Image: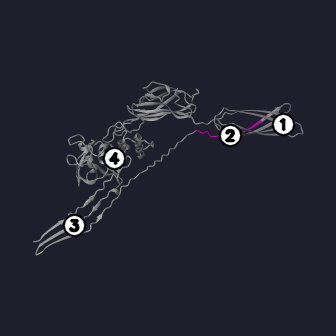
Amino acid sequence: MVVVREFIAVVVPIILLLPSFYYLPSVYSSPFEVDATASVYHVVDGDTFDAFPVGRVRLADVDAPERGEAGYTEATNALKSLVLNKKVYLDVDDLNVMDSYNRIVCVVYVRNNSTHLMNVNHWLVIYGYAKISDYSNEFNPYTWTLYVYYPVEWEATATITVTKTLTTTVTQTVTATLTTSTTVIQPTTVTATVIQPTTLTTTKTVTETRTTTITATVTQPVTTTKTETVTQTVTQPITTTITQTRTATVTITQPITTTVTQTVTTTLTPPPATTTITQTITQPPTTRTTTATLTQTVTTTVTAAIPTTQPVTEITKTITVTAKEATSTQAIRLESGESKALIRREARIPIRLSEAPNGLSGFELTVSVNPSVALIKRVEFPGFGLNESSGAPGSNVSIKAVDINNVVKPGDTNSELAVLVIEGISTGDAALNIEVKELDDDHGNPIFADIKTGRVVVLVSPPPLPAQREPRDLDGDGLFEDLNGNGRLDFADVVLFFKHKDFIEVNWGSSLTDFNGSGRLDFDDIVRLFRRV
């Protein structure tokens, strides 16, 4: 009797999972590891799905509405849109692996682009489809970020091929007992491709170019050419005809005040005739001067009709006069800004003094606005020490202050004198007019300033973003930072801005989120909002 037993090793394909720990110190990364990948074929509800080959998966540390509760359908559809029929990357809870219902507890990621994965758990919380429930596991949901760095090159699968080992034992009962043991070991080929994780540090350089335009008023020089012919008959004691031709070329840079007093005294005692010319130029004092040259040529021809053998003398004198140009300085401006306000909402408009060469001792102003568009609710001061306002709330408000605390110092520029808190009444556009009653420097001298009128634009509150509350302008500058209406500025507002940029441009226009002041809606506005977080 021959008994043959064969022990055949099962060929098992082994998928080499490469759990790795990646951390990049930025808003686009957080600690995570990829323990397995799977393909989702069924979504149970807003926080549970089935995937091959791992089975049922429960999203860690988040809870979505259960069947019959408000938001159940929306949460379920949201999860379907993210993972159904897609490849998911699973960070499995190392402490428990499964919950009491035998569901694998994971932080789930999906591929966002060639370099980043998106955290599905965190996305559902950000957009309001689920809430955080911090269960006992290895995860901390408060450290999650929406995107993690995991390029496609890091996805590696190592396949180990094991050829079977065949062991055959043959036993024969004959005169002699013969035991034959044959072991055949075929070579094992192991092919593994391992791509080591690389820590990539990206340095972003932002180059900002600021262009300052200074508008100065320049008075162009005026060139006047004057030719004057004077014919004078002198009878004392003889008859003399004097023909005097003066050609004067005068270059004057306005404003210039010039007083010319010219005295011509002619004494006829031939020969020679003597002409004395006295010229006086008077002008106001200046603080900054430009030297110009005034050349005046006076030609006097004297013809004496008397019997004499002496020739007629021709007298020619050239007088060069140096004049000073009047001071040309950039005007000091008293200006109020422009602000956008909402109906029954407040906005803030500052009043500023562009220059204070000799400081500021005090001021008294009157500010007015069209009451059908907006009202001035109150006035805020920067701490002068003595200040008051009257007429607020109203459309015509008086503002007065004395700078006993030396807030505005000599040489200061763009000094804030007050802030007007404006409330919108109805949609429209209104000028904010300023009248100066008194504005003095530290020596008691008046400050002469050009007035730049402010502007108030009252708008209707923009519509909420999809599935969000009414947006809010948190600081009254006319720009809406709180896009989800939760009363604060956070990273969720930046994500909503990015996601709904087209919606905002169509339904809000560009002015309400123009954070870089370019006059249009662009991606730099999203960057500027992120820097405010």
In the rendered image, the quadrant that contains the C terminus is top left
Q: Indicate which label's residue lies in the foreground, 2 or 4.
A: 4
* Amino acid type of the residue that numbered disc 4 sits on in the rendered structure: Leu
Camera-nearest residue between 191 and 318: 191
Q: Residue at x 11, y 71 (%)?
A: 2
Locate the N terminus and report the quarter of the image it occupies.
bottom left
Mark found first going from the N terminus, 3 or 2: 3
Percent x, y for residue 250? 69, 39
Which disc number belongs to residue 146?
Answer: 4
In front of the other: label 4 or label 3?
3
Please name which of the two marks, 1 or 3, marks the residue nearer to the observer. Answer: 3
Q: Which comes sooner in the sequence, label 1 or label 3?
A: 3
Q: Is residue 110 left or right of residue 368?
A: left
Residue under numbered circle 1: 273
Which amino acid is tagged 3?
Thr
- Residue, x 43% and y 30% (percent of image)? 421
Label 4 environment density (alpha carbons within 10 Å; few <14, some 14–19, many ≥20): many
Spatial separation of the CA atoms under disc 1 and disc 3? 141 Å
Would residue 1 be found to the left or right of residue 78 on screen? left
Amino acid type, mark 2: Ala
> Which badge, 2 or 4, comes first in the chain's sequence?
4
Q: What residue is pinned by disc 2?
A: 292
In the image, residue 460 sits, relative to residue 157, either above or below, namely above
